[in-house]
Amino acid sequence: QKEVEQDPGPLSVPEGAIVSLNCTYSNSAFQYFMWYRQYSRKGPELLMYTYSSGNKEDGRFTAQVDKSSKYISLFIRDSQPSDSATYLCAMSDYTGGFKTIFGAGTRLFVKA
Amino acid sequence: DVKVTQSSRYLVKRTGEKVFLECVQDMDHENMFWYRQDPGLGLRLIYFSYDVKMKEKGDIPEGYSVSREKKERFSLILESASTNQTSMYLCASSYTVPLLEQYFGPGTRLTVT
């Protein structure tokens, strides 16, 4: 079983839709949860991160962590064609180690 | 803006060749990483370095080695390239505190024939 599971998609939505992207994980030691966005032919870039459980909002993006269910989500409101990218969840236990575990990524297409 | 650059965007090599992938960062980051990215498998850590001349194995170090002679430069070496090393290779760097955000280069698409 992989430490982090993420549906690869692709997920295709019309412009303006609310998008929900999700990951599940198995390691209860994870404390930091991140979402990276990767455009085609580019490296990933950090979109948001949260510590432990709860929600965090940044503009049209909301990250949610449910540690009891080992489940994290990224919501995109009013999705735009420019949001079309691959979204990778990532997590770390940050116990002095340097390893971040990445999900496989979900490919999102937002149609105009 | 942090910049992480990789020496090549696309590379084609033959089986058995020694391959060098170079990565340079301009933000004085302590940590540097090499990942490979394959469909359905996500990013897998090959090696990382937390200081000059220091290196640690990641999850899939077999067939690879690294070199960090200067703080800004981290090289990945494929000692004898094989077809199963055909992949996208991504370099990243980060500060130690906070150890959260990794800054990625654009990647090198390596094909081994």
Image: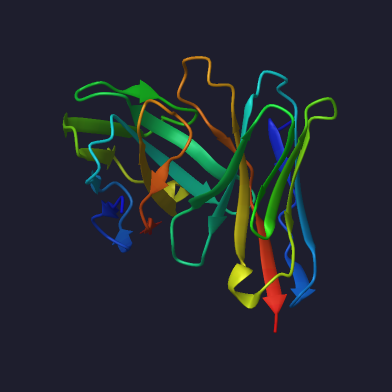
Q: Is residue B87 above or below residue B71?
A: below
The residue positioned farthest toward the top in the image shown: A95
Q: Residue at x 45, y 24 (%)?
A: A98
Q: Residue at x 74, y 70 (%)?
A: A78
The residue positioned farthest toward the left in the image shown: B70
| In this rendering, position of residue B32 left or right of residue B52 | right
The residue positioned farthest toward the bottom in the image shown: A112
Which of these two is toward me, B19 or B76?
B76
Q: Position of residue B19 (x, y in %)?
A: 25, 47
Quadrant placement of the C terminus of chain A = bottom right
Which of these two is toward me, A22 or A57?
A57
Q: Position of residue B81 (x, y in %)?
A: 33, 46
Quadrant placement of the N terminus of chain A = top right
Which of these two is toward me, A7 or A93?
A93
Number of on-image labels: 0
Q: Position of residue A96 (x, y in %)?
A: 47, 15
Q: Picture quarter containing residue B92? A: top left
Q: Position of residue A15 (x, y in %)?
A: 74, 78
Which of these two is toward me, A12 or B62?
A12
| In this rendering, position of residue B100 left or right of residue B3 | right
Q: Is residue B46 above or below residue B89?
A: above
The residue positioned farthest toward the right in the image shown: A69
Identify the image's colour scheme: rainbow, by chain, secondary structure or one colour.
rainbow
| In this rendering, position of residue A52 left or right of residue B89 | right
